[in-house]
Amino acid sequence: MGRFLPLLFLLMPVLFGGSPLLGSIQDPGGLPPDLDAGTPPATGLNILWLSVEDMSPWIGPYGDRTVPTPHLDALAAQSIRYDNAFADSPVCAPARTALITGMYPTRIGAMHMRTRSQSKSAAPGSYGDLPLYEAVPPPFVRCFPEHLRSQAGYRTTNRSKTDYQFKAPLGVWDDSSRRADYRVHADGQPFFGVINHGGTHESQAFPESKRRDKAVSPDEVPIPPIYPDTPAVRDAMARTYNNIAAMDRWVGERLRELEESGEAERTVVFFFSDHGVGLPRGKRSVYGTGTRIPLLIRLPPGHSPDGLPPGSSTDRIVSFIDFGPTVLSLAGVEPDDRLDGRAFLGPFAGAPRQFAFFHADRFDSAKDRTRAATDGRRLVVRNFLPEVPHLIANGYRERIPMTADLYALRDGGSRAHLRTPAQWQTGSTRRPTVEWYDNSDDPWEVQNLASARLEPLETDKFQELERELDQWMQATGDLGLIAPEVDMVHQRLWGGDSQPSTQPPTLQVETEGSVLLRSQTRGATFSYRWTKDGPWLSAPRGRIQPSEQAQQVFVVAHRLGYKPSTPTELKLR
C-alpha cells in the first residue's frame, strides 16, 4: 500500500470530485490559430489508411510464418516497419477516438467501451442509471480530416467505420459510407482515404461466423503459453490465422486498386490494426497482446525519413494519438501543439516518444480500471480494481467457445489442475496491485517481476516507469478514475443533468465578401452547404467565401461532445 500513497494524494481531486486537474477538458488556451492566415502549402501527397480490426502483429513481416502473407511481405519490403506501435486502448471505440482527435481517451471522457450505446450481450439492468453520453474534448480539438479539407484542399473519404465516442461533425468527411471511394476526386486534388477491413474482428471467431479458406489447420497452429491446449483453443487460433490469410488477400486487392488508379507514386500507405488480437487476454487487456499493433508505412520515393530506407524497421515508440498529427504533417499542415499526439513523419515531426500509456476501463457493462505504461521493452501495470479477475467477464467475448476453457482454469473446473504457470493471469480470481514485465525475455508478459529481486538498475527503470505513469494520469486529469461513472458524466462532461447543446450559428458578412460564422458555444465547428441537398463542407475557423450568386447558406454548428445545432438557413443578401 505504501507505494500508492503518493499516487492517492496526487489523484484525490479526481477520485473524490474536487476541482479539475491540469489537462482536463477545461480549455487550455482558446481556439486554434487562424486557419486562413499563414498556412503552409499542401505537399500534394495522398494518404491511404488500410485499417484492419482486432489483430496483433501475427504476420510475416513481424516474423510469424504460420500462414502466408505475401502481400504484406511485399508491402513491408517497400515500407518502414514500426516495432513499437501501440493503440492507446485495447478496444475499438476508445482507440478510434484517439486516432481521430489526437487526444488521450482518459483526458476527454472516451475511455469506457462504449458511451453512445449499450451492449445487447450485457445482462438487463447491468448499466444501472448510466446515461448514454459523448466524450467532450477541449474546445480547440477537431477531427483531423477537417483540417485536411479546410487547410490543404484534401478530399477525405472513409469506408466506413467511425465508432468514435462522439457524433462526428458533418464536415469531417466528403464521404463516409460503405461505398466511399478515394479514387473519386478532382484532377490534382490530394486525398486522404480510410478503408477498414472487419474480417479479422473478434466476432469472426464466433461459431456462426463465416469460415475463411483454410490456410492452416487446428492441429498445426502454435498455441501461446497463456492458453491451454484444447480443441476449442486450437479452433479459435486456426480461425484467427485463416482470417489473417484472407485479410492479406484483401490488402493485395487494395494495393492493386491504388496502382491502377495511377496515384501510387505520390501516396503514403499506412497499414495497421485498431488494437491487439480479438481473443481473450488480447482485446480488452493492456498487455502487449491487446495494445501492440502492426504498423507498416510506405512512403513515396524521396520522402523516407533519415536513416530509414524502404524495408527497414524502427523501434521508435508511436501511439494512436500520434497518427492524426502525422497525417497533417505529411500533408504540410502544422498540427496544433496542444494535442496529446505528436507527428513522427513529415516536416513537423518531433522528437521520439520515450513512453506509451494505456488504459482499460468499463467494457460494455463489466467494470475495469487499469493503467499501464511501456518504454517499448518494460511494461508497468497498475490495477485499481484488484478484486476483478484478469479475464474480466464479458458476454460478447463469451460467444467465442474457447472462453469456457479459460473459465475452467479459473473457477476450479475440470481443467483447473492443468493450469501452467504461464496461465496464471487467465486463471486468476484477483489481480496484484502492480505488475512489472520485461518482454525482452518474456514476450508473453507472464513473469511478474514486481516482487522479484532485480539488479538495482533494472529496479530503477521500473520505478521510473511507474513515476511516468503517475505523472501521465495527473497531467491528463484521468477521468476514468472518477467513480461512479455517472458522476463523471454529469459533473465533468455535461456540467449538469443533460448533454449540452451547441448554440445555433450566426453570420457576419465582411467587407471583402467573405462570411464569418459564429456560435456562442466556445469551440464550435461549422459545417455548411450552399443548397439543401448539396455536400457538407467544413469551416473549422468559421470563415467561408460565397460566390457572387449565392443567396443563402445552410449551416450546422457543432462542438464535439455537444448536441449539434439544427441546420440553419442564413441569408447572405
Image (tube, helix red, strand yellow):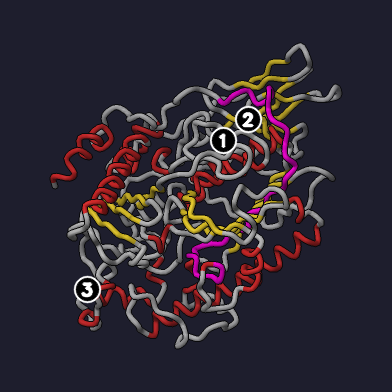
Give 32 or 352, whichever is nearer the viewer. 352
The answer to whether the residue labelled 2 contacts the one labelled 1, judged by CB atoms less than 8 Å apart, is yes
Q: Secondary structure at mark 2?
A: loop
In three-dimensional space, the C-alpha distance between marks 2 and 3, rounded to whole angstroms, equals 54 Å
Q: Nearer the viewer, mark 1 or mark 3?
A: 1
Residue type beneath disc 2: Pro
Residue on which disc 1 sits: 142
What numbered label is drawn on residue 540? 2
The quarter of the picture where the C terminus appears is top right
> Is 9 rendered above or below residue 209?
above
- In the rendered image, the residue lying farthest to the top is 511
* Image coordinates for residue 383, horizontal then vertical, percent: 25, 53
Direction from residue 338 to residue 72 in the image, left or right? right
Mark 1 is surrounded, within 10 Å at the Cα level, by few (under 14), some (14 to 19) or many (20 or more) other residues, namely many
User: Quadrant of residue 483 in the image?
Assistant: top left
The answer to whether one can see residue 170 in this image is no
* Boundaries of the magenta span: 32-61
Residue on which disc 3 sits: 411
Q: Earlier in the sequence, mark 1 or mark 3?
A: 1
Q: Earlier in the sequence, mark 2 or mark 1?
A: 1
- Asked whether 231 falls inside the magenta stretch, the response is no
Q: Secondary structure at mark 1?
A: loop
